[in-house]
Amino acid sequence: MPTDTPMLPDDTGLKTRVLVFTNGSAGSGKSTTAAAVAYAAAKKKRKVCYIGLDKQRDGSRLLGYDDPDGDEDLPTLYDVVDKLVTLPEAVVPARDTKTKEVIDNLWVVLESKKLEHLEFKLANETARELWLYRMIGQLRGRFDVIALDCSGDVKLGTIGAIIASDEVVGCTKSQEKEARGLTELEDKIAEVAEAYGHTGMPTGIDWVVITEGVEHKSQGKVYKDMEQQLREAYGDIVLETVRDDVKVPEAYTAGQPVTLYSPNAPSAKAYTKIGRQMKLYR
Ligand SMILES: Nc1ncnc2c1ncn2[C@@H]1O[C@H](COP(=O)(O)OP(=O)(O)OP(=O)(O)O)[C@@H](O)[C@H]1O
Ligand SMILES: [Mg+2]
C-alpha cells in the first residue's frame, strides 16, 4: 500500500450513523445503492466507511478492490471474524478503479469469498447475533456514516448487521419478489428486536429505496403499480425512486459507484438526492 495512503481516521467524536442496506431478497439494488450513496456522501466531505458482508464481493469491487482474496496483505471482514485483525485494522481506503487513486473521505472493509462460512464460523459463539454489534463501537466517532451492505437473505450476517445498525434502509426493486422481501425483512426485524431490543437496534425499516430497474419496457405499468403500492404502504420514508438507467450496469462493469462513474446520470442524481433526503449531507 502506498505510504501516502490516508490511515484510518481518528476518533474525533463524530456522531456516526450506521446504515444497513438490506432486503430479504437478492438482486434488490443493495450494493448499487450502498456504494452510490457512500460515494455521494464522501464527495460532500462526509467521512464514510463501507462494510460489505457478501461473499459475492460486489461492493468491494465497486470501491476499487477487484479481488480482495487475491492479495494476502489485504485484510477482509472475514479476517476480523476469524480474529486475525481487529475491525479498525481492517479498514482500508476506497480506490477509484479507473485511476487507481485513493478516494478522499471513503474507506472500506473488504469482503471475502470466505464470508460464505460466516454462520459456521460464528456457530459456537454465545449470542452470536451480536457479532458485529460487539465490534462496531470501535469505528464509531471516526466516521459520519458507516454503510453496511448485506447479502440477499436475512440470515446471521444480515441479522448481525441490523442489530449493529442505527437505521435500516430497505432496498427494493419495483417488483413483487423484492417488495415481498421487504415484508420478510420487517418480520425479521420485529422478531430480532424482541430478543435484542436492549441494544438500541432499529425496530423497523427507516427508509425505503425503490429501484425501478425495468428490464422489459412493456411491463412498465406493473412497476409503476408496485411503486404506488410501496408508497401507500410505507409513506414518506420512501425516498426518490431510482429509475431504470443503463449507466448503473455500465458503472458496475467499470467497477465504480454510479455517482462516481456518471455523476450527471439520472440514477446518480437520484442517489445524490436520496443521501440528502436521509440528511447525510445538505
Ligand atoms: N437503476 C437501475 N437501472 C438499471 N439496472 C439497475 C439499477 N439498479 C440496479 N440495477 C441492476 O440490478 C442488479 C442488482 O443490483 P445490485 O447488485 O445492486 O443488487 P443487490 O441487492 O446488491 O444484489 P445481491 O443480493 O446479489 O447482493 C445489478 O445488475 C444492477 O446493475
Ligand atoms: Mg449486493
Image: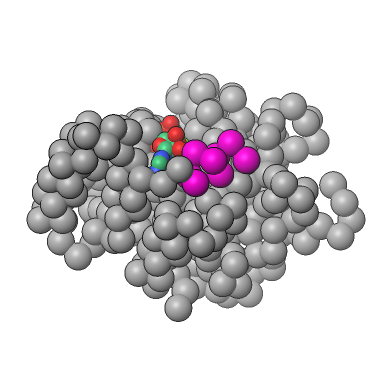
Most extreme residue toward the bottom is 282
Vertical position of residue 98 compared to residue 118: above or below: below
Magenta stretch, main secondary structure, is helix
> What residue is at 56 percent from the left and 55 percent from the top?
262
> What residue is at 35 percent from the left and 53 percent from the top?
242
- Which of 24 and 243 lies nearest the eye of the viewer? 243
Q: Position of residue 26 (x, y in %)?
A: 36, 31
> What residue is at 75 percent from the left and 56 percent from the top?
102
- Which of 17 and 242 lies nearest the eye of the viewer? 242
Q: In which quarter of the image is residue 59?
A: top right
- Which of 84 and 127 lies nearest the eye of the viewer? 84
Please give the range of residues in magenta.
Answer: 247-254
Vertical position of residue 12 compared to residue 190: above or below: below
Q: Where is residue 141 in the image (x, y as percent from the top left)?
A: 57, 68
Vertical position of residue 55 compared to residue 187: above or below: above
Most extreme residue toward the right is 3
Q: Is 120 contained in the magenta span?
A: no
